[in-house]
Every structure is written in structure tokens, then in C-alpha cells.
Image (cartoon, coloured by chain):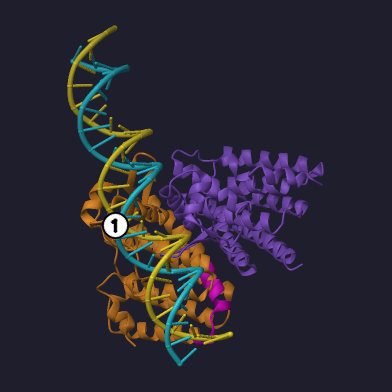
Chain colours: A purple, B orange, C cyan, D yellow
Amino acid sequence: MPISVVILNRPVMTQFNENPITAADKTFFQLRSDIVEGVIKAGSKLSEAELSSNYQVSRAVVREAINRLESCHLVERKANIGARVVALTPEGLVELYQVRESLEGMAARLAATNMSDDEIADLNELLNTHFQTVKGGETYYQEAGDVDFHYRILLGSKNAHLISMLFDGIYHLTRMYRVQLGMAGPRVTTAFDEHRHIVQAISNRDPELAEILMRRHIAYTQKNLAAKLND
Amino acid sequence: MPISVVILNRPVMTQFNENPITAADKTFFQLRSDIVEGVIKAGSKLSEAELSSNYQVSRAVVREAINRLESCHLVERKANIGARVVALTPEGLVELYQVRESLEGMAARLAATNMSDDEIADLNELLNTHFQTVKGGETYYQEAGDVDFHYRILLGSKNAHLISMLFDGIYHLTRMYRVQLGMAGPRVTTAFDEHRHIVQAISNRDPELAEILMRRHIAYTQKNLAAKLND
DNA sequence: CGGCATTAGATTGTCGACAATTTTACCCTT
DNA sequence: AAGGGTAAAATTGTCGACAATCTAATGCCG
């Protein structure tokens, strides 16, 4: 089914794109995309001169882009030695999902209190849309739909720190694992039910339950990924 | 071993210092300290030229330092406009502590599983040291002792993401609020009991309880600070 | 007199060159 | 031939100058 292939070609996150202003912005976005999508291999060294030549910008611009990538935890830099793209390891995946579970659990908790009635109505509507696609057997729900869902709840938390940490950092790294370890797999229908229950809890303005359900949802996803990783 | 005694009068975080290598490192540490301690006022604009002159380094170095400060959430940068030190607001404080509660709760949970018996023994010993100082009526326990305690549990989580997020980012912002809003107040004895119960849970290898207690501990602290803020 | 366009000043963004450090290659010694 | 030290090459760090953009001051027009 080449459906999931279609999505990979169109960076999912792009729908929420901040528009680049400076050359450093453009280079940063380009580099980030190339790293996440695997155009630049995980664990490889980033040569400033080489990138400067490839992307047609000065070394200073490349350096700024690399610095930003470092604060996203997508590259690691050592003084006087250089920068390497992070390596993808099973332990790293586990650690990443532990952080996600913690932060997104809190996001769901806060969303139950801070989302407006209108936003909750929109969220329910989104869920209906997803239900149609799931019922129709579309498998691309996984990628785009899931991101969309989590992003809305994250915004609903109204917590700028949470939003920035997850959106600027964690999500890209998560996607890097999914793409490069070839984990676009299904788990669609059960995930949909989990989403439904979370929205239910938020609609009921039940922060504790919303958090618990979100944490379970992410823990399930982690186990699912870890299992595939060990094939 | 009176470790916490030695530390106090200088910047508390310094005990865990990564040593600066490049000029950008030094400038970054210096700037971060000056911002956290209030030498540079919250909300003020950072002029690259001015800083370049004050710190005796080129603008390129200042720019790199500012970029790093941005990823710590200590300054905010806008393209073609410049960087400002973050403003300290009651809402910002609440958001910050929501993130702390979430992340440190997870850290305590993980520590209950991942800390070695030796590390737990050390933690208990640290607690005894703190008990002596509390019994002796020393009030400086608050600052150094509290930081020390939280830092050990954080390390005990063995999760590099958690450690980096809290240590490189959240903690400095937390301290900035405490210092600049003049909140070095006591709450010492109750906080000590909370610490004791958390260590108990970790010693019992009880992740759920450790997380719950840590989250409560931080929530209490938040309420305490918020109350003082509204005087 | 108030508001808007234009222009001068100041600030940030970008670049190429030089300095410092690390890595590699080569030679010498054992 | 293996190991270590030295020199050459390559890479990162730092700098000052120039370009692009924003801010403010000035003057024009309604």
C-alpha cells in the first residue's frame, strides 16, 4: 500500500510551519528536514565547509543552523571537534518516549482546564473526520491524523514552555525515529479509540483522567514501536 | 561530608559546572549568570554591539552566546529586531512549575527503578546531612540543599533528555525567579519531610509513589511561591 | 496641527579572511 | 615493523567589514 509512502514525501509538520525569514532560518529548516527524513544519515559528521558549499550560504549561517539543531537535540556538538547527527538507539527511543509521556500527559491535563468550549468542539469535529477515514480503511490516519490530534491538545494546554519543548524539539526527533526505523505501521483503530476517550475526558473537564489516558496512549505507542524495533 | 555548606555563597549551580572551552562558552556562562542574578534586568534589550564591547569579544561570539540563551528560554529573539531578556510574570512562573512538576515527577519515577543501591545509599546520607543542618536551625538549606537533592534524583533517572532539559534550561529559569522576586524564603522543615518521604519511596523501589510525592512536593513549592508573589 | 512618506541613523544579518585547534601523514627511532 | 614525535593539512573558532533591515527623525501634504 503506497499510501504511507505518499505522506513521507510531504513533511507532515509543514502544516504548522513558521515561515523562515533569514538565510539561517531557511538553512536550519532545510537541514532539519534532511536530518529527520534521513537524507543526512544518523550519526554522520556535519562538515561546516561541506554544508556551506551544498546549501550555498556562508559558514557563519551554517554554524547558526547547527547551533539551533543542537538545541533540538538533533545534533551533538563538541568544542573544536565538530557536530554529529544524533545516533538512533533503542535506549534513546525509550528515553524520548518517557519524556513525551510526561510532557504530553501534563498537556492533556492542562487542556482539560484551559481549552475553550469552541476549541473542544473543534477537537470533537476533528475526531469525527478521523473516524470517517478509519472506517474507510485509510491507513494514513496514523501519521498525519495522530500528529494533528496531539498538536491540538498541546496547543490547548496554553503553556508556552510545553508547546515549545514538544513542538520545537521532541516531535521532530520522534518523527526521525519513525521515518528512519521504518515505523509507519498501523495500530490505527485502537489508537483512534484511545484518542476518543482522551477527548471525552477533556470534554468532561476531567484533568486527572485526561492525563492518565494520554500517558497510557503514549506508553502503548512506545511499546508498539519497541516491539517492532526488536524484529 | 558538609558538601552543601561549602557551596552556598557562590552561584549554587556552579558545583556541576561544565568548564568553558571557547570564548563563546565563557561569554555564554557569564551572560547567563548576569541574567539569572539580575545584573542584566529582566525584559531588557540585549544590544550585540554593547555586549561585544562590555565582554571584550567579537559580535559573532556574542551572537552565539545569545543563541544559546534563547534555547534555554532565558532570552527571546526576533529576526532583524534583536533579543530581549525574558520578562518575569506570574503566569510564566506557573507555566514553569507545571513543566517542572511533570518532568521531575517522571525523574523520580525513573530514579526509583534506575538508581543503583549505592546511589540510594548516598542519597540517604545526603538527607542525614540535611537533617543535621535543619535541626541546627540553618536556613540556607533551602537553596543549596534543595538544588542538590533534586539534582541527584534527576541524575538517578539516567534519562539524558530529562537531565538536559531540566539542568540546562528549567533550573536556571527557576533560579532567576527565586533570586529576582526575592524568594529565598524558608518552608524548610516541611520541605525536608517531603524530601524524606520521596527518598523512602525510591528506597522501596516504588516508582508510582515516588512520582506522586515529587509532584506534590513541587506543587507545594509552586503554591508557596505564588502566595509570596501576591503580597 | 496631525498624519504619512521619505530619509538618515542605528541595529541585525551575512560574508570572507585569519587564528587556534585538531586530525592526518610522514619520518625517525627502537 | 611498531610506536612515538613532528610537521603539514584540514577543520573549527574568532574577527572586522559590508549588506540588509528596522527604527527615528525630518519634512511635506492635507
State yes or no: residue B157 in magenta: no
Residue at the location (25% across, 54% down)? B40
Question: Residue B80: x, y in percent?
Answer: 36, 39
- Circle 1 Cα neighbour tier, 10 Å, few/some/many (<14 / 14–19 / ≥20): many
B207 up-or-down from D8: above or below:
below
Badge 1 is on which residue? Answer: B35
Please say whether residue B44 is visible from this viewpoint.
no
Please say whether residue B4 is visible from this viewpoint.
yes
Horizontal side, residue B73 vs residue A131: left or right: left
Horizontal side, residue A209 vs residue A138: left or right: left
**How many marks on residues?**
1
Please state which amino acid type lies under the numbered disc 1. Answer: Ile
Question: Residue A88: x, y in percent?
Answer: 62, 64
Question: Residue A45: x, y in percent?
Answer: 54, 61
The answer to which of A7 and B224 lies nearer the viewer is A7
State yes or no: residue B112 in magenta: yes
The answer to which of A73 and A84 lies nearer the viewer is A84
B226 up-or-down from D28: above or below:
below
Residue at the location (70% across, 44% down)? A7
Chain at numbered mark 1: B
Question: Residue A208: x, y in percent?
Answer: 58, 58
A190 up-or-down from B45: above or below:
below
The answer to which of A74 and A92 lies nearer the viewer is A74
B129 up-or-down from B97: above or below:
below
Secondary-structure class at tag 1: helix
Tell me where the magenta segment starts and ends, as one range: B105-118
